[in-house]
Image (cartoon, grey):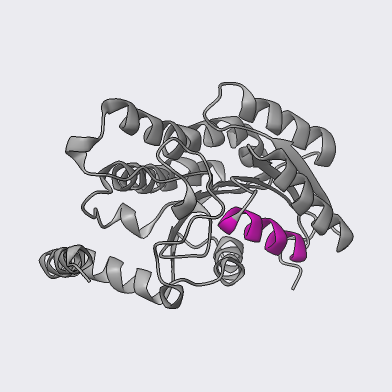
Amino acid sequence: MQRFAGKVVLITGASSGIGAALAREFASSGASVALLARRAERLRAIAAEIHARGHRALAIPCDVTREGDLERAVALTLAGFGAIDVAVANAGFGVVGAFAALRLDDYRRQFETNVFGVLRTAYATLDELCRARGTLVIVGSVSGYLAAPSASPYAMSKFAARAFAEALHGELAPRGVAVVLITPGFVDSDIRRVDNLGHVHPDARDSVPTWLRIPADVAARTIVRAVARHRREVIVTLHGRLAVFLARHTPRTLAFFVRRSRMRRREPG
């Protein structure tokens, strides 16, 4: 179904995982896609794949933590496609470790990408989204509801992203802009292969078992449908919906299971 025929979608963090899958899915739904990320070669390969399928794509190297990069990317998108109807603030990674072992710079680095990167994306695209009466998509996480031990920087950043989305619903609705919060559980991606400095280790083992992860393309189909329907929030994965339900209604029960799970992982053998 060509839900986005004639539309232009800008996606940050589009070189792998959910971002790359969204680029393919939006293109298959008729959109022209602008792909933004730091890894230029990966971007060009994905753009070439989309071109080969008969769709339009731009590969734009961009670092959401660097001042001016998003404004330049927006200008290139407008030069190539003439508009921006949907902006997807997807770029992110996870800083992990016990609080006592981390430093303020670790928290700053986390927020620079996962919070200020979202803000930069929103600021850079806002005028075009208002002009198009378009949609801002913010990719959060189940960790925006559940703060697990040894993941405080990541959880804090995703709580902040959720709060930002909640605030913007009321602010941007009068200007004709929909805000959609995406709350994924475990999805196949590189995020668990990225170290605390933001460097990708492609050969690293994913710490989440295969049975608990869903393919990125499955997640992307769910997300694109939610964006087309202007859903306020979509929680991706069954375990994600369960975790959010427990966090909202029985937080102590959820905390108990999280602690038990952590203790089991520490047991020898």
Residue 236: x %, y % from top left: 45, 68
Residue 254: x %, y % from top left: 18, 68
- Residue in the foreground of this view, choosing between 3 and 46: 46
Whether residue 173 sits left or right of residue 252 in the image: it is right
Q: Quadrant of residue 192?
A: bottom left
- Residue in the foreground of this view, choosing between 78 and 146: 146
Say if the magenta span includes residue 24: yes
Whether residue 262 sits left or right of residue 108 in the image: it is left
Residue 184: x %, y % from top left: 44, 62
Magenta stretch in the rendered image: 17-29
Compared to residue 205, the image places residue 112 above or below, namely: above
Residue sitting at 20 percent across and 39 percent down? 99
- Residue in the foreground of this view, choosing between 8 and 258: 258
Q: Quadrant of residue 28?
A: bottom right
Residue 144: x %, y % from top left: 32, 53
Compared to residue 5, the image places residue 171 above or below, namely: above
